[in-house]
Each structure stands twice: as structure tokens, then as C-alpha cells.
Image (tube, helix red, strand yellow):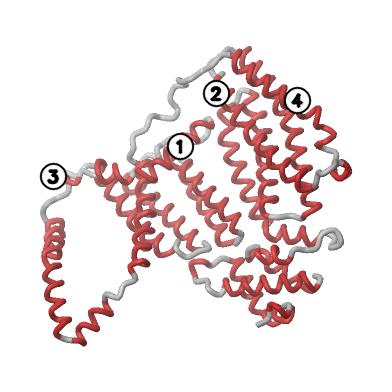
Amino acid sequence: MSVVSERTRLGLDILAAATLAGIVGDALLRAVPWGLNAFVCTAALVAGGWWLVRRHRVAVTRDALWLGGAALLVASNFVARDAMMLHSFDVVGLIVLLAVASLSLKGVALRGRQAWHYVHAGIASALDAWLGVFPLVGRDVTWSELPSEGRMRQVRGAALGAALAFPLLVVFGGLFTSADSVFGTVVASAFDVDFGDLLSHVVLFAVWGALVAGYFRGALIRSVVPVAGGESGLSLGIIPVATALGLVDLLFLVFVVIQLRYLFGGATLVLAAGGLTYAEYARRGFFELVTASALVLPLLTGADWLLRNQPAEHQRTFRQLATVLLVLLTVVMASALERMRLYVTAYGLSEIRLYSTAFMLYLAAVAAWFGWTTLRGERRHFAFGALVQGFAVLGALHLVNPDALIVRTNLARPPAERPFDGWYAASLSADAVPLLLQALPRLDPSARCAVAAGLLKQRARLEHDDWRNWNFARRSARRLLRDHSAGLHAELCPAHRT
């Protein structure tokens, strides 16, 4: 009698969990926009991981517990809010948590890791998820170890019998169908299959199941070099690093000094500059400065890593140059935020403006954290703190309710400066519906018409929801729109009435 190895048992259980995940994912995730279904699938994934760890006594770190809770907390946002952009960030947050959780499932503690450890974990988890199912089936599970007697023998025998019977069923079925029209009708109705829909089910089941199998395989089976290993690899001296960093400092300094009045000139300077509009001044300037700010932290993190084996005086020189760059970066970030303030004052708030501002504030917090940790010789605390700050910003966005904040901000602007964009406001998610209905009587006629038309379209979309799309915001909006349906129809312009 063959003995089934623990590796094979774990591989088979991973395949079983992935099969169940594929079924659940196909049944739930095809209903969009996501709501309760996203939370249920995340809970199933966390439960599957917990079952595999407990069943096979996998040694994991204590971080796994709070990471599972964090994943459920992020997924619960799908049940609370309805903003699509916010849900996109939730998906990114879940992916980041899963990548970090792979370290914990491998027995690696998260605290004290450097930034490149997290980057390595993210890349490895992505590769495992997409490709891991193939080595899992082809190498990790030793199929010859499976028993050839008992139930397995019966299953194989039944499968062989079904394969042998298939051509016979086709032949006899064809004859009976030709001989009896009633029987033919029954067979035709039984096999009236929408093959396009069937293919979509198969593809979603296969892709989702394969991703889950590959992820768990990489986290629980694949042998890896410990990320806490030695600090070998590329290293440079202080001369090239200081030269490069000094030149970057000089560029930032020249930019800040020459452009200081221009950057903070405000509305007066913008209007005085020939051919310079608010859009050119704020939109282009803001996003270019956000990009520059986002590149500074990878630059400093990489420079710090290259100097990790250098003497203390060399690292002190780097920290001085890095401090100068961070001070100049603060001015650049302040300029970017001022440009966005001017842009919002002139044109109102939108999703891209709100989320870009939130990203800039996150960069500012991470830059301050970099200065507090890495530049004080405590680089191992930086990456974990930056990760926590990212989820803190995501949580803050959910608390402020972005779509409602956009509507509230735009409503507060004097109509004489810029008319309220009712079409855009009504195109936002269900999160904005209560505020729009409350403000509807105060709007001018054209804005009321646009908002009413947009909200009625949104009601039509919400009426097609099922339990998989359910969340609090959509439920509340659907109820409110039903109650105000008559009033909304009364506000429609003649061209929109049917």
C-alpha cells in the first residue's frame, strides 16, 4: 500500500479549496458592480487559507491573524460604499494584503522588513497566482502516491465506463430522436445550451480557481530563500550616490527658487500671465508635481539600500543630502496642493481631483515617515509603517464618503462663479443620491432637470440589482429613489419626458 506524502496531501487540499473558490467566484463575481459578493468571496478565501493552515499545521506568524481580519475589513467596504473608484482602491488594497500575507504564511514576520522585501513578495505572489497551478498539478502532487484500490478504483472505473458509453449514447440517442418526435423534442430542450454563456462560466471558474490554487501553492508549498537572509548584492560607494543625489538636490533647488513666486502666485498671477488658464496652470502643474514627488521616495530608498554597507560617515553624508531633498520636496508638494486648490475653486471637485489630492497627502505622510525612520538609522521600520499609512488613507476615504464630498463641495460654490454640474453629480454612485435629493429643491431649473434625469437613470440601473450587488448605499438609494420617483419625473425637462 502506497503512502501519501504530506506535500501531496497539501497539494490535493489546495486543489479542493481552489475548486470550491472557483465555483463560488463564478456564482458571485459575475454580478457587477460588486457589493456583498466581493465580501463573501473574500471571506471564502480567508476561510480557505485558515482551513489549510489548521488542517496541515502550517507554521505561520501571528501576523496572519490580523492580516485576515484586515482583508475582511477592506472587503466590507464593498458592502458600505458604492463609489467605483473607491472600490478600485479596495481591490488594490486586497491584492496588497494578499501579497503581504504570503510572507506570513511562509513563516516570515512582517515587522522589521525593508521595502524591497515587500516588493519581492508582491512580484512573487503575482507570479505564483498566475503560474503556480501548473507546478502544483504537475510536480507538487505525486499522483502515483494515490491509492489504486477502494474508492479511487471505483471512481476510475466509473469514469472509464462513462467514456465508453458516450459514443453509444450518441448513436442510440440519434436513432431514438429520429424515430419519435416527442422524444426528439425532449432531447432538444434538454440540450438547448447557450454555449457562449457556458464558456464564460468555464473561463471564470478556471481563472479564479487557478489564481487561488497558484497563490496558496506559492504561500504554503513553494520553497523560498528566506527574505531575512544576508544583505548581499549590489552596493555602491558614497561618491557616485552623493554625486547623483547632489545633482537632484540642485535641480530641485533651482526649480523652487526660480519658480517660487510663480508657484505661489495664485489667481492674480494666473490671470496676469498671457495665455495661461486655470486648467493649464493647475491641471498640468499638479499632476507633473505629483509624479515628481512620487519618484523621490523610490530614489531615496534605493540610494539608502546602495549605501547599507558603507561606513557611518558616508551614511551621514547621504542623510544630509536626503534631508535637503525632503525639505525641497515639501515645497514642491505644497505647490502642488495649492495648484489643486485653485483648480477646485475655479472648476469644482471631481473624482480624479479628490483621489489625486489624497494620493499627494499620502506621499507627504510617507516622506515624513521616511525622514523619521530611515534618516534616523531605523530603516527596517519604514516599509511596514508606509503600508499601514496606505490603509489608513484608504480608511479615511471611506469615512469621508468621496462622492458625497464631491457633491457637497460643488454645491457650496456660488452658482454665479460656476453653475452646478447636475449631469456629473447624478452620474456619481449611489453614495451621492441622498445628498442630491436633499439639495434638489435649491438648484436652478436646468440643474434640477439634469439631476432628475440622471437619478432616474440610476434608479433604473439599481432596480436590476440582485443580492450579490447588495450594499447599504445602493439599498438606501434605491429606497429613496422609489419614494421620490414622482417628484423626479415632475422636474424633468420636456425633452426628457416620455
Helix, strand or loop at mark 2: helix
Q: Is 175 rendered above or below residue 342? A: below
One can see residue 473 in this view: yes
Q: Amino acid at mark 4?
A: Leu
The numbered mark at residue 2 is 3
Disc 3 residue type? Ser
Total tally of numbered discs in the picture: 4
Q: CA distance from mark 2 to mark 1?
A: 17 Å
Residue 478 spot, x, y in % from top left: 61, 73
Answer with mark 2 or mark 3, whichever residue precedes in sequence. 3
Q: Residues within 10 Å of mark 2 (few under 14, many from 20)?
A: some
Q: Which residue is labeled 1 in the image? A: 121
Please name the amino acid that badge 1 sits on.
Ala
Q: Is residue 57 above or below residue 160?
A: above
Relative side of 211 to 477, left or right: left
Q: Which residue is mark 2?
A: 305
| Image disc number at residue 225 | none
Please tell me whether mark 3 sits on a helix, a strand or a loop. Answer: loop
- Specify few, some or many for label 4: CA neighbours under 10 Å numbering under 14, 14-19, or 20 or more: some
